[in-house]
Amino acid sequence: MECAGILPEGPPRSRLDALAARCAPGTAIAAGSVVVATLAAGQRASAHLVLSDPARCVRGVAAAAPGVEALLLRVTPERGPSASGAGGRDALVGSAGPVCPGAGRHLVEVEVTAGAGEVAAAFAVAE
């Protein structure tokens, strides 16, 4: 992922903050929207975010530990089509701009497509 450059090493959860700061400036990881799991290729983990403001926009971010070679990240709104992004150890949905899903309960889902290890995914919301 071009915007990520070289992120600091560390646990995937702490790398989410660095990824959001570098690739989605002006956002912060939304409390309660973080999922951390140890996954093998083909396995998925997900978390939800409830937005009450229909004008609020988000980005999906995911980071993985060494051992994970490729990720697929999806943001699925309560209504409407999903958006996805793929990457090596880092993935972002909304690289060209935020996704504005409207009010409702939205899903962020990360899938390891190659390798295995700890991953973290979350919504990044404008501060």
Image (cartoon, helix red, strand yellow):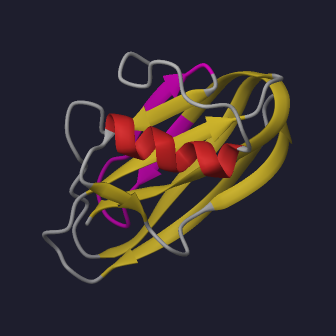
Q: Residue reaching furthest left?
A: 55
Number of marks present in the image shown: 0
Q: Is residue 74 visible?
A: no
The x, y position of residue 65, in whole percent, is: 76, 33
Kindly identify the residue that appears in the image at 44 percent across and 68 percent down. 30
Relative depth, front residue between 72 and 9: 9
Quadrant where the C terminus sits is bottom left
Asked if residue 48 lies in the magenta stretch, the reply is: no
The x, y position of residue 91, in whole percent, is: 51, 31
Asked if residue 87 lies in the magenta stretch, the reply is: yes
Q: Residue reaching furthest front?
A: 8
Q: Tell me if 26 is positioned left or right of 45 in this view.
A: left
- Which span of residues is magenta-colored? 73-88
Relative depth, front residue between 21 and 112: 21
Q: Residue reaching furthest bottom?
A: 52
Quarter assignment of residue 117: top right
Kindly identify the residue that appears in the image at 49 percent across and 61 percent down. 107
The x, y position of residue 23, in whole percent, is: 34, 35
Quadrant where the N terminus sits is top left
Kindly identify the residue that appears in the image at 30 percent across and 39 percent down. 94
Q: Is residue 99 visible?
A: yes
The answer to whether 1 is drawn above or below residue 65 in the figure is above
The answer to whether 99 is drawn above or below residue 96 in the figure is below
The x, y position of residue 15, in whole percent, is: 59, 42
The answer to whether 67 is drawn above or below residue 24 in the figure is above
Q: Tell me if 69 is positioned left or right of 84 in this view.
A: right
Q: Tell me if 87 is positioned left or right of 75 in this view.
A: right
